[in-house]
Amino acid sequence: MRCLLIEDDIPTAELIREGLAEAGHQVEACHDGATGLARVSSERWDLVVLDRMLPDAVDGLDILAAMRLRDDRTPVLVLSALSSLDERVRGLRSGGDDYLTKPFALDEMLARVEALARRAGQRPEPDVLSAGDLTLEPRTRRVFRNGHPVPLQPREYQLLEYLMRHQGEVVTRKMLLAAVWGFHFDPETNVIDVQMSRLRNKIDQDGAAPLIRTVRGVGFTLGAGRDEPHAAE
C-alpha cells in the first residue's frame, strides 16, 4: 500500500516507517499537521497513519475531520498517547478507523494496518464519478467533458471532486474551505468564488450546459439548472 505517516516525533516516525517498509508498503512521512493536511488533501493514499497530537495549529482530529468532510474514505489508523476511553471514542467518532495508544508494539501496529487493508479492499474506490457528460477518475485525477480532457489545477480538481461526491446536495463555502483549504482560512475571503469561476470556465466551454450552480445565500450545487443571484452568507 501507499501509506502517509503523519508523526511529529522523529524516532517514532522512523521506527514506524521502517516497519511498514519491511512489510512491503511504500511510506512517505511528514512531521507537522499543516503539511499532513496539505498532503491528504492533494494526493491519493491507501492508508494514513496519523498522530493524534501534533505540535502546531492543525492537529490529528482536524486532519481527520477535513478528510471525512470531503468524503475521503482512506483508512486512518490514529496513534495517540491519550489512552482514556473518552479519547479513544472521540478519535473513532471523528473518523478514525482504528485507534492505537502509545507506547505500542510494532507487530501490533502492523497487524492493525493489515486489518485496515483487508477492510478497505471490501469497499473499493469508484473508478469514475459522473454528472451528465462530465466524468472524473479519482484514481488518475483526470477529468473529461463530453469525452474531451479538461486540464485542472489541484485546487480546481479538489473543488470539482468534492462537488461530484456530493451531487444533489448544497455545499456551503465554509464546507468547501474546510475540505479543500483546511480549517484555518479566513471565511470572508473570496478565494472560493475565484477558483469556482476558473473551474466553471474550464468545464463549461464550447456551449456545454452549465453544471455548477450558485445557490443564493448558501453556496453551490452540481447539476443542470440556472444560477441564483449570489448573496453573502
Image (cartoon, rainbow, N blue to C red):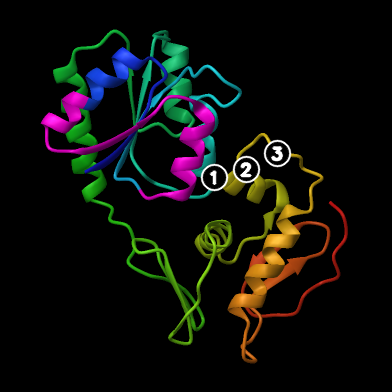
Residue position for label 1: 69
> Relative to residue 133, is residue 106 drawn left or right?
left
Q: At numbered mark 3, what does the secondary structure look like: helix, strand or loop?
A: loop
Q: Is residue 152 visible?
A: yes
How many angstroms separate mark 1 from mark 3 (CA)?
16 Å
Residue 113, image quadrant = top left
Q: Are marks 1 and 2 in contact (CB under 8 Å)?
A: yes
Q: Nearer the viewer, mark 1 or mark 2?
A: 2
Residue position for label 3: 185
* 86 or 37, nearer to the observer: 37
Tell me the amino acid under the disc marked 3. Phe
Magenta highlight on residue 134: no
Residue drawn at (73%, 53%), measured in percent from left and top? 191
> Relative to residue 118, is residue 68 drawn left or right?
right
Tell me the amino acid under the disc marked 2. Ala
Q: Which contiguous range is marked in magenta?
A: 18-44
Magenta highlight on residue 41: yes
Tell me the amino acid under the disc marked 1. Leu
- Image coordinates for residue 101, horizontal then vertical, percent: 33, 13
Q: Is residue 14 above or below residue 181?
A: above
